[in-house]
Amino acid sequence: MKIIDGKSVSQAVKERVRNEIAEKGLKIGLAVVIVGNDQASRVYVNNKKKACELCGITSFEYALPEETDEAQLLELVDTLNKDPRVNGILVQLPLPGHIDEKKVIGHISPEKDVDAFHAVNVGRIMIGDYAFLPCTPAGVMELIHSTETEISGKECVVIGRSNIVGKPMAMLLLHESATVTICHSKTKDLADVCRRADILVSAVGKAGFVTADMVKEGAIVIDVGMNRNSQGKLCGDVDFESVSGKCSFITPVPGGVGPMTIAMLMENTLRAGKLQSL
Ligand code: NAP
């Protein structure tokens, strides 16, 4: 079994972005908007800021108070849509309950939607004609590619059908000619279905959810989950101890998919900047 090192793969992606920006002398900017005081969101935003610095991307941070109303946030998005220094706009989710997330995402110009959550970008991904890929699934694809495994013709099982992970994940695997099954909370005989997988991607959000009996010998196991175990330690969905003895490759948590998400955001921001300058 080999551990897929998300830190080093993500580092390579960020270096690719940094080198291109430096070599071409590009001016690229990313606006990150955070509303309220969610601690986890704060950590993500800080990590995104650090990644921007490393890549030579200018970051513009807008930290708005919890009581910001929807109209104010939409106005800020409008301003950022028009700001030529801003190539990418990221509104950190979740937003406070009184703000309609769908409405806010729908307000971001699709050309600056570097999270690829806007319906226009989701549609483009569906038809395979896209500028940006959603960061987490795109990061997973980079990790699978780093194993030099041919995806075409493989049985892939994705556990989870959210709009930000499960569904686009399945679509990206399908675009690479895998046979894809999407599982969710109503799936019957989940363990049986998972055991068919040459590549198993778990995006459930439950610690210890994927156990060794659900994994085919020699499978690639990608753990998207970010959970806290009973000791409060960060962990994924996969029971690493037992599963790692059975698979060919596995991603750890932390240090697997997490760092890739931010690296792919940097890549999307660079791509947005290049497309906007055409
Ligand atoms: P989500 O919206 O809560 O979706 C979870 C999915 O898991 C749902 O489709 C749900 O099925 C399915 N599920 C729940 N219980 C199940 C069960 N017993 N059997 C089979 N399927 C079950 O979560 P998400 O936003 O996709 O995120 C998933 C995990 O990935 C979370 O831990 C999140 O923190 C993590 N995440 C990590 C990154 C990263 O950068 N590493 C990025 C995004 C998310 P139903 O649809 O039927 O309810």
Image (cartoon, helix red, strand yellow):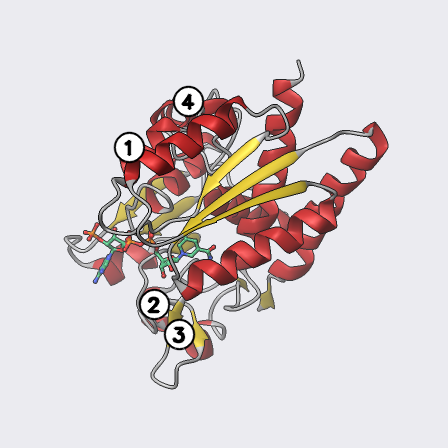
Mark 3 or 4, nearer chain start: 4
| SS of the residue under disc 1 | helix
Neighbour tally class for label 2: few under 14, some 14-19, many 20 plus, Cα within 10 Å: many
Compared to residue 62, the image places residue 5 above or below, namely below
Residue 101 seen in render:
yes
Task: Identify the residue under disc 4.
Answer: 124
- Quick check: 161 left or right of 147? left
Lower position in the chain sequence, tag 4 or tag 1: 1
Residue 221 visible in the current orientation:
no
Q: Which residue is mark 1?
A: 103
Left or right position of 111 against 158:
right
Q: Which residue is mark 3?
A: 239
Looking at the image, residue 173 lies above or below residue 277: below
Q: Which amino acid type corresponds to the residue marked 1 in the rendered image?
A: Lys
In this orientation, which residue lies closer to the viewer: 162 or 55? Answer: 55
Are dots 4 and 2 in contact, CB under 8 Å? no
> Which badge, 2 or 1, comes first in the chain's sequence?
1
Q: CB under 8 Å between callouts 2 and 3? A: yes
Three-letter residue code for mark 4: Arg
